[in-house]
Image: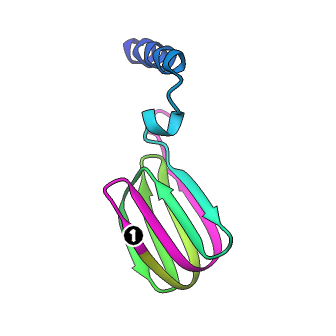
Amino acid sequence: MKRERKLKRQNRFEELLEIPKELSSNEPKITIIGFNQMLIENYKGILEYQEFYIRLSTYLGIININGFSLNLSEMTKDDILITGKIESLDFEKEVDEED
């Protein structure tokens, strides 16, 4: 109950300041440029990396990227740029204990 009130208060404050949601939360933001580049912001870590398959952990679940000649071109603590021939993208939602 207290957590819900705190989140509501925080959300109102962020709305007043017009802070973009991706900056104030841990939700991943995925930007796809054609079939050759993908920028993922707010990721937690790399679970698996192969030339044809990449799995990334995020705060909401796992992102699976399939393709050919996939490379982790640029990485920072919060962002990762994937290049190569991207064929598909899917998500594995993290299961909440409360659900």
Is residue 86 part of the magenta span, yes or no? yes
Residue shown at 47%/86% (left/top)?
Answer: 51
Indicate the quadrant containing the N terminus: top left, top right, bottom left or bottom right. top left
Residue shown at 43%/41% (left/top)?
Answer: 26
Query: Where is mark 1, residue-wise?
Result: 74
Residue shown at 42%/63% (left/top)?
Answer: 80
Using the image, determine if residue 38 lies above or below residue 79: below
Where, by quadrant of the figure, is residue 49 drawn? Answer: bottom left
Question: Is 31 on the left-hand or right-hand side of 3?
Answer: right
Kind of residue at badge 1: Glu
Q: Secondary structure at mark 1?
A: strand
What is the magenta range? 73-99
Tell me how the rendering is colored: rainbow
Is residue 5 part of the magenta span, yes or no? no
The percent position of residue 55, horizontal first and vertical second, equals 46, 69
Using the image, determine if residue 40 lies above or below residue 13: below
Which residue is situated farthest in the front direction here? 17
Dot 1: few (<14), some (14–19), or many (≥20) neighbours within 10 Å? few
Where, by quadrant of the figure, is residue 43 drawn? Answer: bottom left
The percent position of residue 99, horizontal first and vertical second, equals 52, 36
